[in-house]
Image (tube, coloured by chain):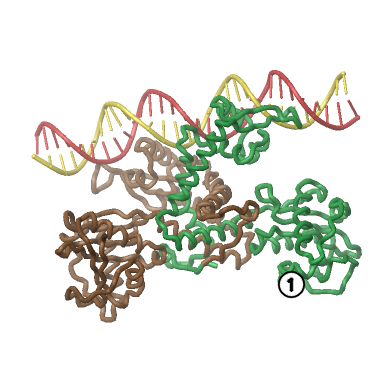
Chain colours: A brown, B green, C yellow, D red
Amino acid sequence: MATPRPSPAAVEQPDLPDHVEVVRRFNRSYTQRIGVLEESFLGLGMPLGTARLLYEIGAEAGTTRDLRARLHLDSGYLSRLLRRLEADALVVVGPDPDDRRRRRVELTPAGRRAWAELERRSAERAENLVAPLTGRQRARLAAALAEADLLVRAATVRIEEVDPAGAAALAAVRSYVAELDERFPRGFAVGDLTAGTERLRRPDGAFMVAACDGVPAACGGVQPLGGGVGEIKRMWVHPGWRGAGLGSRLLRHLEGVARDLGHSAVRLDTHGSLTEAVGMYRRAGYREIERYNDNPYAEHFFAKGLH
Amino acid sequence: MATPRPSPAAVEQPDLPDHVEVVRRFNRSYTQRIGVLEESFLGLGMPLGTARLLYEIGAEAGTTRDLRARLHLDSGYLSRLLRRLEADALVVVGPDPDDRRRRRVELTPAGRRAWAELERRSAERAENLVAPLTGRQRARLAAALAEADLLVRAATVRIEEVDPAGAAALAAVRSYVAELDERFPRGFAVGDLTAGTERLRRPDGAFMVAACDGVPAACGGVQPLGGGVGEIKRMWVHPGWRGAGLGSRLLRHLEGVARDLGHSAVRLDTHGSLTEAVGMYRRAGYREIERYNDNPYAEHFFAKGLH
DNA sequence: CCATACCTCTGATCTTAGTCAGAGACTTTC
DNA sequence: GAAAGTCTCTGACTAAGATCAGAGGTATGG
């Protein structure tokens, strides 16, 4: 955890330097120093939009549809940009074998070279930034940025309701059971992941996934337990995201969903080896109760009223 | 200091996550989430460039020349933007009394209202970013960003040679002697700040200032002491910048300047109450020597050879 | 007080960014 | 196999960003 340290501006104007002010101050100085350079994304003799598109294709090839979603571009505009890249022989556009209405975009060898050059310049910029710092200061900067990155990403992750048997949900649940299998002393018997998902569906249940850049970051669902009680199931947070409050946020969200579904209380069970989870439930106001099911993997049972 | 924590990506791709990678990763996620919104700088019914200009004028009125330098704009382009703001009655442009070739730009009351609205929206954006976080996490984010801000700013400060009797140098030196007066047990007698500045000029001396956004962050000079020895004088780092390595950087820079000026060693004196400075000199390879002058304020004397 | 340098503005011109309606190709549904 | 829906592309267009040469004021040094 970084030591709160008076920033140069705080010294100048010593009035309430609350969290919002720190964020704004950082935005200004950082975007001025980095963002402005970002705009000369290239000097590759290519306009910004074109370069960004090339960079995105290089990161992961896909259909024009994917690219439009990733970069928030108009279909006509994207089409034009692609034609430009095609004219420069940096990409090839062909029909998607799966659905021939769509078109797939891939880099040519020349495109890969141009992409590598963008990569190189981007890395060079980052290197120039840290160059004047000593090793210790670089480590401090890296630690501070990594911490900020985690929290900013966690703050901007969107929790979305999905089909509990759909691709997004199953990807998250697969990570979940893989971790259980690894952490439980005797492993975890992986059954059919789609079994029992009907109860996690409307009208009596729901399932949520929080994904970041397509990678699942957290998931969890509510299913009916009868008697106006809901049960929170399959709650999981990606190990890399722990400590950023994503779990508490998701838990609060699930409680709200349970309330909307008409439940007046929620229960859940968990294994003792999931210490972070047990701690989080306690902090969130859950009280430990007697065993309420015959789940062989469960050791702790919690409940909370939804007033 | 923030705990190095595996970021979500580091979990996915566990290969060398060096400092450059952390910076690049942060750039991507941060600019995607903040920078993109930054572009819709407002939806104030005003193009981005115009809004940025209005914002800059509001932050500090000045001549068109200043504004051009601050925003890196072409003179013709700026003129056009100003006319637009003038047409909307947000600014008034008039001749600068000091030099009637120049023109001063100021906000009208309506302009101040528009500027306040920009401020409000900018703060709102920062608030929305931290809104999903708990109080503890907000504090962590603020601390991490403040730390990163300090280091990034320190890394991007440019050290420039200036006239030791010029405005930039005197502003820094004024801060320097004000601090000496405050920290020395019996105060510091402030004389004429321009006295003795000739020796800090070429060909035998030099004076450097590191300024950030017009505010002096650090200063220091070299003057001849005779016998191929240079003396480092008036070295000072703004209190808000200490701990970011700016002092060591400046010191190294001054040693390089002294070498270029033909000196083979440097000396300096300092007061015992400036503990940070004493520590820094020791870390930079200076060894304590006998008193070499009659400076009544000096208690410690250092020297270092310039091989 | 004249020559020179400086400063801002205007007009002309160009590129980039972004939007929209509709044509044409393909897929799904009934 | 026709109708309806989906997807990309084209043409037409607008606004914004950016640059340049030169006109016409204003200062400064001899």
| Residue B30 as seen in the image, left or right of residue C21 | right
Image quarter where the N terminus of chain B lies is bottom right
- Where residue A245 appears, x then y in whole percent? 39, 63
Residue name at image x 81 percent, y 62 percent: B187
**Left or right: B3 in relation to A296:** right
Q: Residues within 10 Å of mark 1 (few under 14, many from 20)?
A: few
User: Dot 1 corresponds to which residue?
Assistant: B282
> On the picture, is A90 further left or further right than D8?
right
Q: Position of residue A102 (x, y in %)?
A: 28, 43
Residue A232: x percent and y percent?
Answer: 24, 65
Q: Residue at x 34, y 75 (%)?
A: A275
Q: Is residue A195 visible?
A: no
Instruction: Say which residue appears at 33% left-offset and 71% top-offset.
Output: A282
Q: Amino acid at mark 1?
A: Arg
Residue farthest to the front, as pictured:
A307
Q: Quadrant of residue A230?
A: bottom left
User: In the depicted view, which residue is nearer to us: B305 or B7?
Assistant: B7
User: Quadrant of the rendered structure where residue B65 is?
Assistant: top right
